[in-house]
Image (cartoon, rainbow, N blue to C red):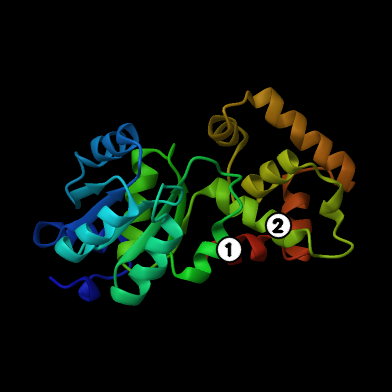
Amino acid sequence: MRLANIKHNFKDFIFAKENYLIKVLIVDDHALVRMGIRHLLSDLSTMEVIAEAENGEQALGLIKLHKPHVVLLDMKMPGIDGWEVTRRLKKSHPSIKIIVLTALSADPLPARILQLGAMGYMTKESSVEEMAQAIIKVATGEKYFSPEIAQKMAINSLESVKDSPFDVLSEREMQVMFMITSGMNVQDIADRLFLSTKTINGYRYRMFEKLSIKNDVELTHLALKHHVIEKMADATL
């Protein structure tokens, strides 16, 4: 079954899995990172890790040999780094999809790497569920960003907007605000940020006070009014 024939839908992809496996290449200069990712993906029947590379030069050779569908690529490697691998790959094999792996959600790379042609951007600490979702989405032509990274991109885009009421919020409050307006409840947010529900509620109440609002509904309305949710969506497209 050709990749182009698989619909951009997780459910449809599952139905097709017996006839199709996503071939994945892992590129990272740390053996433990490669081993960890391979282990995460080993139990997934929808994909197969076909090879690993410890540097850019090795990656380019393996890409030519194996023709993977998705490359999980670390950007900071000695010799030929991830930037150069991406640039060369998009010229020689434009159909191969790239997901950038980063150690820090604050890494200021997403916009630049998108311009080179990468389709995904996520942290190395991502769960197996998130990594699987990212690989499937990217393999079927969609873009994917870890929630934390998408929020960073949206925050950066908001900084260029004049007279935004959200200027008074701290970066952490902005992060919580994005999560609330995307439909997450307090417990989900606490779990995601490894904080207590009491701490998350503390951020909520400080936001309410700063923005002169009373609850999450008013927060969402304010975010819609100032196109914050649109910017959040744009950051992930």
**Residue at the far front in the pictured view:** 79
In this rendering, the label closer to the viewer, 2 or 1: 1
- N-terminal of the two: label 2 or label 1? 1
Residue at the image point whose x is 57% and y is 27% from the top: 194
Counting from the top left corner in percent of width and height, residue 185 is at 60, 39
Residue at the image point whose x is 23% and y is 47% from the top: 52
Q: Could you tell whether 6 is left or right of 143 in the image?
A: left
- The relative height of residue 225 versus residue 100 in the rendered view (above or below) is below
Q: Nearer the viewer, residue 172 or 116?
A: 116
Counting from the top left corner in percent of width and height, residue 236 is at 53, 62
Q: Nearer the viewer, residue 99 or 18?
A: 99
On-image quarter of the N terminus: bottom left
Counting from the top left corner in percent of width and height, residue 219 is at 76, 50
Badge number at residue 123: none
Counting from the top left corner in percent of width and height, residue 223 is at 74, 58
| Image quadrant assignment for residue 208 | top right
Element assignment for label 1: helix
- The relative height of residue 151 versus residue 65 in the rendered view (above or below) is above
Residue on which disc 2 sits: 156
Tag 2: Cα neighbours inside 10 Å, few (<14), some, or many (≥20)? some
How far apart are the two marked residues, 2 and 1, measured between alpha carbons? 10 Å
Residue on which disc 1 sits: 111
**Residue at the far left in the pictured view:** 19
Element assignment for label 2: helix
Q: Could you tell whether 96 is left or right of 193 in the image?
A: left
Residue at the image point whose x is 69% and y is 31% from the top: 200
Label pair 2/1, CB-CB below 8 angstroms: yes
Residue at the image point whose x is 79% and y is 57% from the top: 222
Q: Mark 1: which amino acid? A: Ala
